[in-house]
Image (tube, rainbow, N blue to C red):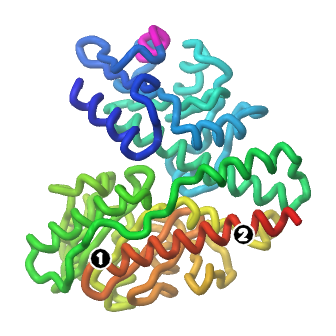
Amino acid sequence: MISQIEKFETRLIKQNLAQHREMIAICGLDDTIVKSGPFGGDVLDSVLGSISILGLVCFVPHPLYKEIIRLTARRVSVISPEDCETRTFLHDVPVIADHAPGPIIKALSRRKGAVFRDGSVIARGVVTIEEAFVCASSVIHALFINYFLDYWRKIRKGHVTASDRSHFENIVENLFPIVESGPRLGYGPFDSESVILKEMVRAGKATVETGLVDSFFGNVSYSQKGICHISETGASLDELEGAIVGVPMNGSSSVGLTASSELGAHIGVVDKTGCRSILHGHPKFSVIASMMCEEDGVCQYDCYKTCPRMRDLYGVPIVSGEIGAGGLAKTLPARIKMDNGAIVYGHGVFATGSNDFRKPFNKMVEIERMARRFVLTECARARH
């Protein structure tokens, strides 16, 4: 239990989700309650003993995220982001007024994660501390996207105040830089299974280390000789050792039951483009840009499932389609191309490569850079 607590405390710092260890509390229920640090005091012990969970993560986020949460949570009791992770995983995010046990217990009895009006984050894990970490990471990811999308919508309606604008400009000034280049990845094609697995592990770590995946969500695959090697469902992209499965692409085996839920989309893209490598992440500005549609708020479609428009971002296709075994397995292969990428509405980026993961990784970075420029330009243009 202690090693798990230390592991995820380090992750919070390393992934820029938190800044100071003394402002992090991770609690686990073993034979007794095991906790890191004094932050949260006896309140978290009370919460952990009052609901059927085994782990809690509570912390003050990095100042950038803290300010976004604080601004978003000022006047509401529930925040309802519209991105994919919220829709499928969080549903909504309760806002807690103070750090008293009662309101925390009420919020976490209903949802996996919540935020406080002061900008702090708390999340629970029913079975593991890892689950609580994933929830907390997803909350920050969702509220970041929600903040920028909400600001853009307010600008379009002419509802932005001078105070709103000042806060927004301060947040933009403090954004993390987009990585120029990631770790050196291997040259393909890869023929042996051992090399394929090694390069998939390297690509997964690069995606997390450069911030292209904020949480455990995302996947990677490499197809060779009729086998799609793909990360398993629920696997962390920076810990793929032993979490990759080889699935026959002709459907002749049930081994795919443990594969990523987006296996169908990967196989469809391989069949359509002839690519070998696919990298999928959730870079934040790409997600935001995909949701900034001119028909926002007026069309009658479920945008994430059945958008009929052929949209793109500087030539990069934006597609709808329900994730997992849903419509994405049809919509994504229809528009993505070799050595290129596509953005899935409210979800993330898929990028392809003919031989290895160098082009998919670089393409994902390029798309995120374009998306960030687009989002900030659109918000700036609307001010004048």
Q: Position of residue 99 (x, y in %)?
A: 58, 17
Q: What's the amino acid at mark 2?
A: Thr
Q: Quadrant of residue 16?
A: top left
Identify residue for label 2: 377
Quadrant of res 139: top right
Residue 324 can be seen, yes or no:
no
Q: Position of residue 254 (x, y in %)?
A: 21, 66
**Viewer-side residue, 345 vs 118:** 118
**Residue 46 lies in the magenta-colored region:** yes
Q: Residue 301 sits in which quadrant?
A: bottom right
Three-letter code for the amino acid on which mark 1 is drawn: Phe
- Judging depth in this view, the residue of 210 and 275 nearest the camera is 210
Answer whether residue 294 is magenta in the image. no
SS category of the residue bearing label 1: loop
Which residue bears the numbered disc 1?
A: 357
Q: Nearer the viewer, residue 239 or 85?
A: 239
Q: Can you say which quadrant of the picture contains the N terminus? A: top left
Find residue 49 and report its horizontal and vertical position in percent: 41, 12
Q: Give the secondary structure at mark 2.
A: helix
Q: Badge 2: how crowded within 10 Å, few (<14), some, or many (20+)?
A: few
